[in-house]
Amino acid sequence: WLTRAEDRLFAALYNPRARFIQRSGEVDDDLVTFGTGVLFIGESHALDRLSFRSTHLRDAFIAENGDGEIDTVFLRLRLTARQAAQRWGADALGPKTREALARGLLDEKFVFLQVVQPRPDRDPRRMDNRNLPFASLVIDVDSEHKVGESGFHEFPFAVPRWDTASGEVYGRS
């Protein structure tokens, strides 16, 4: 059983569509250059494979919990109207982004903010998106519109830090 589980895990990680090798390489570059990297680990929108996404440090704000572990990430996402519609659905987007879609301006870029953080005010007996241990909130910044709120069972980011001094959150290279 363990051998089969390991084989399935490696097949999922190294599925070319998951892009683990590419994204982890990008995070390694950020780790060496800036001292901190940010890697999202989740499922694709079709829920048919793992999905890895790296975020440049200029677009990420991180925070630690009381034990010194990164448990909060704010991401600035610059997405085209088409990409945003693919991620969250056109109906969930703000009016400016929907207008760009309607006018056929699919490649016009918009700024979104995603916040992933612990959710202290949850009902642990319920396992719907709004009661999972980690909250995820997405805002369409240009339209000042809440795109959606969901959650994660576990913190979905790996945030390696090369070296830190006491009291520092961001690593040094």
Image (cartoon, rainbow, N blue to C red):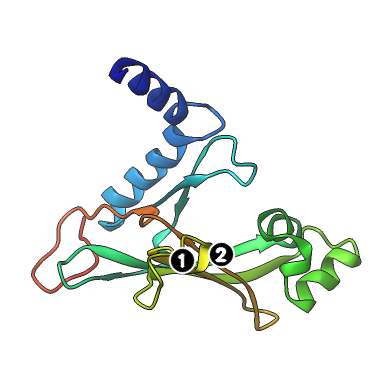
User: Which residue is depicted at the point 60% across and 64% down?
Assistant: 78
Residue 104 as seen in the image, left or right of residue 82 = right
Q: Quadrant of the N terminus?
A: top left
Q: Describe the element under mark 1 as helix, strand or loop.
A: helix
Considering every residue shown, the one lying at the far left of the view is 166
Q: Does 85 appear above or below 3?
A: below
Please state which of residues 75 and 135 is positioned toward the viewer in this rendering.
Answer: 135
Could you tell me residue 9's position as x and y percent? 39, 27
Q: Do the residues labelled 1 and 2 touch (CB within 8 Å)?
A: yes
Q: Is residue 38 shown to the viewer in this render? A: no
Pointer 1 local density, CA inside 10 Å: few below 14, some 14–19, many at least 20: few
> What kind of element bears circle 2?
strand
Q: Which of marks 1 and 2 is nearer the N terminus?
A: 1
Q: Mark 2: give few (<14), some (14-19) or many (20+) Cα within 10 Å.
A: many
Q: Which residue is found at the position 21% from the left and 63% from the top?
A: 69
Residue at 26%, 52% in the rendered image: 160
Does residue 160 appear in the picture of this structure?
Answer: yes
Query: On residue 86, which mark appears?
Result: none
Calculate the distance from the C-alpha at mark 1 to the C-alpha at mark 2.
7 Å
Image spot of residue 120 (x, y percent): 34, 76
Residue in the foreground of this view, choosing between 6 and 75: 6
User: Which residue is labeled 1 in the image?
Assistant: 59
Q: Position of residue 102 (x, y in %)?
A: 90, 66
Identify which amino acid the numbered label 1 is placed on.
Answer: Asp
Q: Is residue 3 above or below residue 23?
A: above
Left or right of 147 on screen, residue 104: right
Q: Nearer the viewer, residue 144 or 125?
A: 125
Marking on residue 77: 2
Reply above or below: 22 against 154: above
Hey, what amino acid is under mark 2? Leu
